[in-house]
Image (cartoon, rainbow, N blue to C red):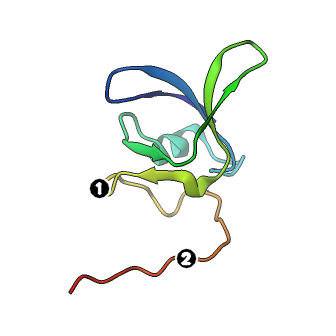
Amino acid sequence: MATVAEDKTGECITLTIYNHVNASITFAQLQKVFPKSIKIGVKNPYMKITNAGTIVIRNDNPQNIVFEEHSFQNKDLPVKKVKGKKKPVKEEV
């Protein structure tokens, strides 16, 4: 999947996201996972020069996409599940 990402300063770049959704996802479902103007963070992004010579930010690991806390993400959509250890959540006292 490829989209355009804009940072806080208004700079835009193509963001390519791999392995996040199943190939069978429809465009309507994809818009629910990544709605317009959603705020996300990308941990460990890397820049790549495509065969066409453009620079993109690429992310291969779905765990590196962080959605803003109040952003909506429908759990019934065909999003790939990533196996691995989950970190325990600290409770505030």
In percent of width and height, residue 79 lies at 60, 57
x 68%, y 71%: residue = 83
Location of the N terminus (image quadrant): top right
Q: Earlier in the sequence, mark 2 or mark 1?
A: 1
Residue at mark 2: 86
Residues under labels 2 and 1: Cα distance?
Answer: 21 Å
Q: How many marks?
A: 2
Q: Say what secondary structure mark 1 lies in.
A: loop
Q: Nearer the viewer, residue 1 or 11?
A: 11
Given the image, on which type of amino acid does mark 1 rest? His
Given the image, on which type of amino acid does mark 2 rest? Lys
Residue at mark 1: 70
Q: Nearer the viewer, residue 90 or 15?
A: 90
x 66%, y 15%: residue = 54
The quadrant where residue 45 appears? top right
Q: Nearer the viewer, mark 2 or mark 1?
A: 2
In percent of width and height, residue 14 lies at 56, 25
Looking at this view, name the residue that lies furthest to the right.
Answer: 51
Looking at this view, name the residue that lies furthest to the bottom.
Answer: 93
Location of the C terminus (image quadrant): bottom left
x 54%, y 43%: residue = 30
Against 75, residue 25 (above or below) is above
In percent of width and height, residue 44 lies at 57, 46
Against 8, residue 27 (above or below) is below
